[in-house]
């Protein structure tokens, strides 16, 4: 066999062929993806700066399988080259390019209308002097990843601020919260929620834990008699507040434990 025939019989390596049209389509899709990512990052950064400027705080979610250094550990954890590279990029470009904001603490209500720019937001804590409006609860109810909500008391020189705060935190507000299908934990302090509002909140599909103090709840020992708990509810604590904002009495509800096998109900 001659040299030419051997060269002809040798199989040729196949190279994929990409037409100009396919190449332009791939570049267009890449540009759209990068544009969406950049826009999402800039919106998150804008909301973070707004929260921090008002005296609030934010916490970023960890990436999957991310190793966190223990400040009390004897040896630093071993990180892969990819984790080191992502850490360097996050330190250079900013956390917002690589992590979602998972928790926020709000000192006022200025950023509530923009919280929908934080798609990974799971926890919101709001100070009592945030001057909330009814429409703010509608915005909170529409957050897709929200699981925990804390509306806490803020004392000023020993006097409870229960005027504007408590007037907004009523049955209409918790009705909006009960519409969020993912909300699991609600802690509300200094409200005017009644037994009717508590019933709606307790019936939410994912609700597990409720802490509620109210001026209008009535006798805490009787407020559970007509409550129909949702499938996930495991704890409810209700406190009745006096005119000075101090707790008068409270009561707790939890599911009755199942009887042992073979026991009569």
Image: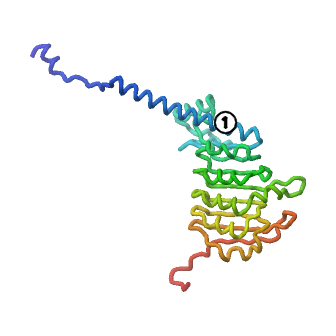
Q: Secondary structure at mark 1?
A: helix
Q: Position of residue 91 (x, y in %)?
A: 63, 31
Location of residue 94 in the rendering, given as x and y in whole percent from the top left corner: 63, 32
| Direction from residue 261 to residue 228 in the image, left or right | right
Residue 18 is drawn in which quadrant? top left
In this rendering, position of residue 38 left or right of residue 112: left
Q: Which residue is mark 1?
A: 46
Taking the view exactly as shown, the residue that stands out farthest to the top is 3
Left or right, 247 with reference to 119 = right
Q: How many marks?
A: 1
Quadrant location of the N terminus in the rendered image: top left
- Give the position of the C terminus as an image quadrant: bottom right
- Where residue 144 appears, as percent x and y from the top left, is 58, 51
**Residue at image point 69% right, 66% down:** 197
Q: Residue at x 68, y 42 (%)?
A: 71
The part of the image, by quadrant, that contains residue 113 is top right
Q: Nearer the viewer, residue 5 or 58?
A: 58
- Which percent across, then down, holds residue 199? 65, 69
Residue 63 versus residue 233 in the image, above or below: above
Q: Nearer the viewer, residue 132 or 83?
A: 132
Residue at position x 55%, y 37% in the image: 79
Image height check: is 16 above or below 106? above
How many other residues sit within 10 Å of disc 1, few (<14), some (14-19) or many (≥20)? some
């Amino acid at each position: 066999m001659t040299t030419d025939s051997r060269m002809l019989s040798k199989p040729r390596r196949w190279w994929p062929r990409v037409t100009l049209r396919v190449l332009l389509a791939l570049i267009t899709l890449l540009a759209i993806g990068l544009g969406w990512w950049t826009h999402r990052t800039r919106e998150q950064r804008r909301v973070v700066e707004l929260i921090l400027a008002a005296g609030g705080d934010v916490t970023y979610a960890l990436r999957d399988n991310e190793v966190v250094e223990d400040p009390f550990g004897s040896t630093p954890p071993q990180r892969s080259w990819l984790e080191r590279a992502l850490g360097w990029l996050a330190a250079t470009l900013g956390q917002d390019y690589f992590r979602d904001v998972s928790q926020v603490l709000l000192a006022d209500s200025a950023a509530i209308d923009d919280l929908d720019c934080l798609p990974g937001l799971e926890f919101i804590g709001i100070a009592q002097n945030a001057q909330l409006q009814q429409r703010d609860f509608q915005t909170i109810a529409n957050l897709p990843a929200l699981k925990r909500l804390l509306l806490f008391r803020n004392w000023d020189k020993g006097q409870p601020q229960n005027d504007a705060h408590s007037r907004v935190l009523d049955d209409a507000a918790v009705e909006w919260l009960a519409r969020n299908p993912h909300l699991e934990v609600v802690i509300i302090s200094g409200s005017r929620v009644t037994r009717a509002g508590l019933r709606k909140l307790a019936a939410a599909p994912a609700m597990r834990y409720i802490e509620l103090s109210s001026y209008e709840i009535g006798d805490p020992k009787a407020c559970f008699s007509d409550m129909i708990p949702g499938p996930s509810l495991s704890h409810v604590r209700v406190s009745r507040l006096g005119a000075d904002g101090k707790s008068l009495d409270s009561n707790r509800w939890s599911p009755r434990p199942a009887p042992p096998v073979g026991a009569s109900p």
